[in-house]
Image (cartoon, rainbow, N blue to C red):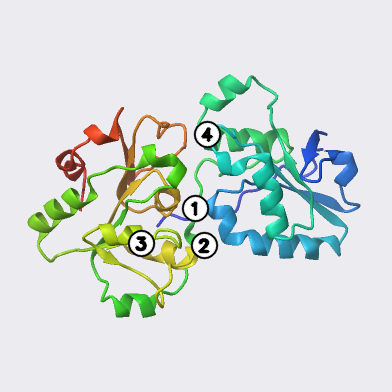
Amino acid sequence: MTLTKTPICDFGRKAENFKLKSTDNKILSLNDIKGDKGTLIMFICNHCPYVKAVIEDIVSDCKELEKYGINSVAICSNDVKNYPEDSFDKMIEFSKSHNFNFPYLHDETQDISKEEFDKKPVLDRFDHQLKTSGLNTKHTMFPNFSWSCSDITKIQTEYDLKKYIILFPFCSPHLSSKKWPYYNELIKIIKDQYKNEYKILVAPGPNELNDAKEFDAICVLNDEKALDITQLSSLITNSSFIIANDTGPAHMAAHLNVKGITLFGSHTTAHKVSIEREKFKPIQVEDLKKLSAEKVFEKIKL
């Protein structure tokens, strides 16, 4: 796996001021919240699996930074229409449930046309947000998620995992248009072609345990519970191939540099969400219901 170096900031560059609404309904500027020794500015959102994986650590670290005169602020600038979980009301819930000790601000606009801005890939937008906030990074466009992995020897031993394919056939209930309906047909084709060479797995999230029963695949759990994000990262890293809907685990797989494919319908484009990588490729169609299992199988490269 190729590792990237830690991004280097353009130290000494002065951050531009802003005025944004906070989750306690105040309009705050950088001048209102900056610390005596510095200010940590974070671009986050509620639904992001990367954020969810480390949010408790973020809150803890920000509390520690206060001791050194460094204040923190988080900004969410996602499009609520495409990401309802990132609405202002949900931001309030998210900040309260995780006991934020720093302001959480809502950025509804950008300094360029929002229509044009939203056409850009998500990592391009993130890179823009960092740079306009005075942070000059070098590796934003090529994230590396390998730091998230943990030891899963116990799970590997329990399920006798050596060569395996992971399917992620799930999606959020309010985004059912992302769900490809032919995973069981694909499973049959894979088993007919490769016999017992590869185990076929699903790794459901906490709210997907019942859904996992619909698929003719091994459901991988840890003590009868869904894997946490570090265990899931390791399971993905050691896989032979990934087939996924456009969901969080698909994005994890892309940035863990593993082989796989992800399936996109008309809900958005793979280009817009910056998911395509050297080993991880999208299949883009107008209607996922018209994408056959045979067509998907043709793209599997083991």
Q: Residue at x 47, y 37 (%)?
A: 273
Left or right relative to 295: residue 48: right
**Which of the two marks, 2 or 3, is nearer to us in this view?**
3
> Which one is nearer the viewer's eye here, 275 or 289?
289
Mark 1 or mark 3, which has the lower sequence index? 1
Residue 210 - label: 3
Horizontally, residue 15 falls left or right of residue 132, namely right
For the point 41% across and 65% down, the residue is: 234
Q: Residues within 10 Å of mark 4 (few under 14, many from 20)?
A: few
In the image, residue 119 above or below residue 162: above
Q: Nearer the viewer, residue 198 or 37?
A: 198
Give the structural element (helix, strand or loop) at label 2: helix
Name the residue tied to disc 4: 82
Q: Quadrant of residue 75?
A: top right
Residue appearing at x 61%, y 42% in the figure? 86
Q: Secondary structure at mark 3?
A: loop
Q: Is residue 5 visible?
A: no
**Mark-to-mark CA distance, 1 and 3:** 31 Å
Estimate the x, y position of residue 136 in percent, counting from the top left.
67, 40
Q: Residues within 10 Å of mark 2 (few under 14, many from 20)?
A: few
Could you tell me the amino acid type at mark 1? Asn
